[in-house]
Image: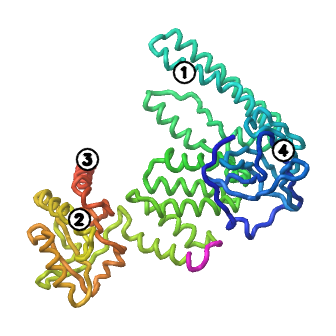
Amino acid sequence: MKGLSTFLILAFFFSTQSYAKGGYNIRVKLENYPEKELVLGFHYGDKQYVKDTVELGADGYFTFKADTLLPCGVYLLVLKPDNSFIQILLPQEDQEFTILTDAKDSVHKMTVKGSEDNAIFYEYLRFLGKLRPEADTLRAQLSRVKGNLADSIRIAGQLADMDKQVKKYQADVMGKFPGSLTSKIVRAAIDPEPPQFTGTAKEVQTQKYYWYRAHFFDNVDISDPCMLRSPVIHSKIDQFVTKIIPQHPDSINLAIDYVIAKMKPAKETYKFYLIHFLNFYAKSNIVGFDACYVHIAKEYYCKGQADWTKKEDLEKICDNAARLEPILIGRIAPNITVKDNKNQPHSLWDIDSDYTVLFFWAPDCGHCKKAAPFMVEFAEKFKDRGVKVFAICTATGEKAADECWKGAEEKGFSDFLFLNTIDPNIQSRYKTLYDVRTTPQIFILNRNHEILMKRIGAEELAKVMEQVMQFQAEKKKQRK
């Protein structure tokens, strides 16, 4: 049994779907379970959901029954009151069976009638359960004898022998029952083993990495609909996209395209992960990862590849992507022309400086007030190092000028340190061009007005600026 802290109710993915004709009939008898209700749940991506709840029958069995088959996958018998659970397998055509077990020792006391797949699955779990205490003991011994080479070699050899036993058992399961759901789950948990490579240590490491990345999904078919309702697929996909792949938006986008293409034949899996990736990168706080959101929106949603999306939601997604795309890191910042306190125009692209810090602020903004001392300190520190602060007050209307100049004076934004500007009628369209929905907003641009960093907190600006300048200096050296 495993613990489950929370359960969610899912209706969205099943309200309009129909499955193969037939039905399921799962009878469950539990010893040491005094409760009168039992919940049937299932794995779904990275979460678990409730499917049904039944009461104890007069025959002493909990019976889950319907005239239609359930989508295949790994399901959960959720025990009250602590939401611990017992896993059962529901292959596509093997959904009428009986299980008898003890709620306090479900694996070792499991008896399955009518389901070969579940019988194989629990034999495998019992095999692993038998080896685990010995393996844990050996690992503990190994950590205690690190200074003793002979004992370390002996214990490591014993652990290696146990690993061989597990691999042999796994190979036997996959060989004898190749089409079973148990076989698919066992295979999915096994990392592909790379061949022997030659070269220097660094060359071998590099070759292993690229081989491992190319063969990461060799043992799991992520287009198999059964895998979506299993505990293995999401961790594999998450590991590939967020850990194996270099965490640069361009590399991540290629990885997402690769994964989505592999799962596209499985419509439900494709839909789940397209929604997952869009939401994940929409919520990301990592600077630059909005490029992943833009990519997913443009390449899939805005090109009609997410036909389940409501029209109004689709319009919002595509509008957000259109707003963000011109100000992604690496893009040339849109040019804007605003005016100073003498009503003189200043264009962003006319700024003659190695770096320009574009700073949007508002007189009545509490966060701007907190940011002000950091901005003043930053401007003083970098004014002689090729950095110009181009400050735009976002107040609008007839009183904007008075509010902005008064606010700049109060906050210490002197004309000696800042190029203070306003655009009370937003003629430059800066709010749209820079997606200024809240203040403060900070962008770092290079001499060519390329966006190097953005969405930085004022308290972090000096540190980030140092890193940017160091990185740009190293790039310049490499080019030479």
Q: Nearer the viewer, mark 3 or mark 1?
A: 1
The disc, 2 or 4, on the residue closer to the chain's N-terminal end is 4
Q: Mark 3 — residue?
A: 474
Secondary structure of the residue carrying tag 2 is helix
Farthest top residue?
A: 150
Q: Residue at x 36, y 75 (%)?
A: 437
**Which contiguous range is marked in magenta?**
307-313
In magenta segment, residue 368:
no
In the displayed structure image, the side of residue 444 where residue 386 appears, left or right: left
Residue 118 sits above or below residue 262 on the image: above
On the image, the x and y values in percent for residue 364 come to 25, 76
Badge 4 amino acid: Lys
Residue flagged by tag 3: what amino acid is it? Glu
Rate crowding at label 3 as few (under 14), some (14 to 19) or many (20 or more) other CA atoms within 10 Å. Answer: few
Separation (CA) of disc 4 from disc 1: 38 Å
Q: Which amino acid type corresponds to the residue marked 1 in the rendered image? A: Ala
Residue behind mark 1 = 140
- Depth check, mark 3 against mark 2: the one in front is 2
Distance in Å between CA atoms under marks 1 and 2 = 52 Å
Q: Nearer the viewer, mark 3 or mark 4?
A: 4
Q: Is residue 262 visible?
A: no
Q: Find residue 456 and report its horizontal and vertical position in percent.
A: 30, 61
Which residue is situated farthest in the bottom direction here? 398
Q: Which residue is mark 4?
A: 29
Amino acid at the residue labelled 2: Lys
Disc 3 is placed on an element classified as helix
The span from disc 2 to disc 4 (Cα, nearest Å) is 63 Å
Is residue 56 visible to us here?
yes
